[in-house]
Image: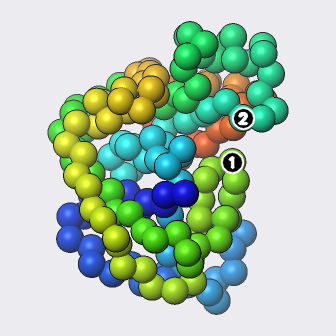
Amino acid sequence: MRLFHVSEEDSIDIFNPRIPERNDLDKSVGLVWAIDEQRLPNFLTPRNCPRITYHVGEKTSVKDKRVYFTTPDIKHVVIIESKWFEAMKNTSLFIYEFDPKDFELQDSIAGYYISKVRQIPIAKYIISDLFAALFERNVELRVVKNLWDISDRIKGTTLNWSICRMGYAQPRM
C-alpha cells in the first residue's frame, strides 16, 4: 500500500500531527492525514477547488455504472466547476509519499489514513499538469458550470463518493 499527502507547498520536510477541524473527530489528538493511491485522484486539483469525485465500489449497482460513467473502462470520475479550469491549468502539486507503517485506516470509502506521530516523507513528486495526471490514472474529468445538482444526485447512488470544498462552489442555481 502506498500513502500520500497532496500539497501546493513544495518544501514540507516534516508533517507534525495537527488537531483536526472536523467535529466528528477527537480534538485532543493531533493527526497526520494521508490518502491511498486509489483515491489520490480526488486530490489532484487546486486545494480549494470544489469538486465531486466518485468511483466504483463493491456495492455499486449496474444501473449506477451505466448512468454515471461514460464507458465501462472508466471507474473513477472527478467533476469541477468551469470557473476552476484555469486554476487547474496553472497549478502544480507536490505529492509527498509516506511509509505506511504508522498509519491506520480512518475512512475506507474516502481512502483516508491517519497517524498520531510525526511523519517524514520518503519521497516527493511534482505534478505540473493536473489534467494529464488524471488522464494517466484513467480518471474521467468533467467540467460543469455548477456542482450542486450532481452533488444532490450522487448522494443517492450506490457509488463511493466524496464531495470536497463546496464552500468555494458557485451558489445553487
- Relative to residue 6, is residue 151 drawn left or right? right
Front residue of 97/9: it is 97
Front residue of 68/144: it is 68
Q: Quadrant of residue 148?
A: top right
Q: Amino acid at mark 1?
A: Ile
Name, please, the residue furthest toward the bottom: 28
Front residue of 157/117: it is 117
- Relative to residue 2, is residue 104 drawn left or right? right
Front residue of 162/32: it is 32
Q: Is residue 167 visible?
A: no
Q: Quadrant of residue 150?
A: top right
Secondary structure at numbered mark 1: loop
At x 77%, y 35%, the residue is 58
The percent coordinates of residue 25 (x first, y second) are 69, 74
Q: Amino acid at mark 2?
A: Gly
The percent coordinates of residue 93 (x first, y second) are 27, 51
Secondary structure at numbered mark 2: loop
Residue neighbourhood size for the residue with mark 1, other residues' Cα within 10 Å, grouped as few (<14), some (14–19), many (≥20):
some
Give the residue number, with chain letter if any, for mark 2.
Answer: 57
Task: Indicate which disc residue 100 carries.
Answer: none
Up the image or down, 67 lies above or below 112; here it is above
At x 48%, y 31%, the residue is 78
- Relative to residue 50, is residue 66 drawn left or right? right
Separation of marks 2 and 1 at Cα, in angstroms: 8 Å
Task: Indicate which disc residue 109 carries.
Answer: 1
Residue neighbourhood size for the residue with mark 2, other residues' Cα within 10 Å, grouped as few (<14), some (14–19), many (≥20):
some
Up the image or down, 8 lies above or below 131; here it is below
The percent coordinates of residue 140 (x first, y second) are 46, 23
At x 22%, y 36%, the residue is 129
> Is there CB contact under 8 Å for labels 2 and 1?
yes
Q: Quadrant of residue 49?
A: top left
